[in-house]
Amino acid sequence: MSSRGVHIVNGIIRSYVPTKNYGFIKGQDGKDYFFHLQDLEDRSQGSLVAEGLAVEFDPEPTPKGYKALSWRIIRPSEVRYKEPDCVLLSKCEEIPGWVILDKSRWIIHGSASGSPDNAKQSLKARAMAIGANAVLSMTYYKTTGAEPSNAGSGTHYFTIHNFRGIAAFAGKPHVRGDINLEEVKGRIDKKARYLKREFEKKNRKRKRISVLVWLVVLPFTAFFGLGWWVDGLKEHPEWALFTIVGLVLIFKYGRPRRIGEWLVQSG
């Protein structure tokens, strides 16, 4: 019971903004009550405050609405969190209404030639690939891509939209949350390190194939191509096929494109 000795109202915390230490309680009387953490009777329980938590309080009308005073938690329980329904993006190091449970040491990049929105979707997908549900300190930048012109000659240059930021995991305290802090600490770093190692393995394999192409395929292609040019197609028609296959292999594997460059460890 409250020490005030006035009418006590029970309710459920309907919303809570951890970064601001305030929120709203839905009272059993059907009214919404504003509350602040500083009015919690047992301040040592401040870390237990979460949405869905049962509380009781002294109601007080104010010019702006109803306020909960001298409120307390009825049944304290372990703090758990629920995660957002989609990946959150923020230009700052915080996200209003959410707690940053784990800030990784990895910077991710998202890119697309269509539009900035497509680049954001790329960033979100890559965040999810390493177990993140938030990107902090997000910034935008442009790069230029090039491809053969549709006209058949020359080069077509185009804008590539890019976003980058720090991968993180965000959660909101909730009594029915299914995540605890220990489960997410370090999880992004672990997944990112594993994925980066896999990228490097594939890049080394591609490089070995490239070296093989230049050392083996190129000489044979040059040999058959020269023979085709000297002797003509009628003498050795298969040489033309060998030459074409060799050129295709050189074009495809001779200059391997590195993968995983969107994932960079910071610091």
Image (cartoon, grey):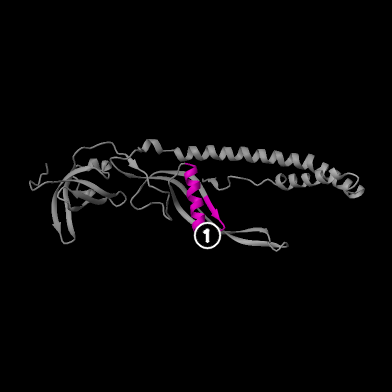
Left or right position of 47 against 184: left
User: Which residue is identified by label 1?
Assistant: 115
Find residue 134 and report its horizontal and vertical position in percent.
Answer: 43, 48
Residue 31, horizontal then vertical, whole percent: 17, 53
Residue at image location 69% in from the left, 41% down from the top: 207
User: Which residue ends up furthest to the left in the rendered image?
Assistant: 5
Q: Which quadrant is home to the N terminus? A: top left
Q: Crowding at label 1, few (<14), some or many (≥20) Cα neighbours within 10 Å? A: few
Mark 1: which amino acid?
Ser
Residue 29 lies, with reference to residue 201, above or below; the image says below
**Left or right relative to 48: residue 184:** right
Q: Look at the image and tell me whether residue 41 can be seen.
A: no
Left or right, 95 with reference to 263: left
Q: Which residues are magenta?
A: 109-130
Residue 153 against residue 228 in the figure, above or below: below
Name the secondary structure under disc 1. Answer: loop
Left/right of residue 28 with respect to residue 155 in the rendered view: left
Residue 212 in view of the camera: yes
Residue 95, how many percent across, how many down?
37, 52
User: Which residue, as the protein is rendered here, is positioned at the far front?
Assistant: 234
Say if the magenta span includes residue 113. yes
Q: State the count of labels.
A: 1
**Most prominent secondary structure in the magenta stretch?**
helix
Image position, residue 255 (x, y; %)? 70, 47
Residue 143 covered by magenta stretch = no
Residue drawn at x 18%, y 39% as measured from the top left: 74
Q: Which of 157 and 77 lies nearest the eye of the viewer?
A: 157
Residue 160: quarter of image = bottom right
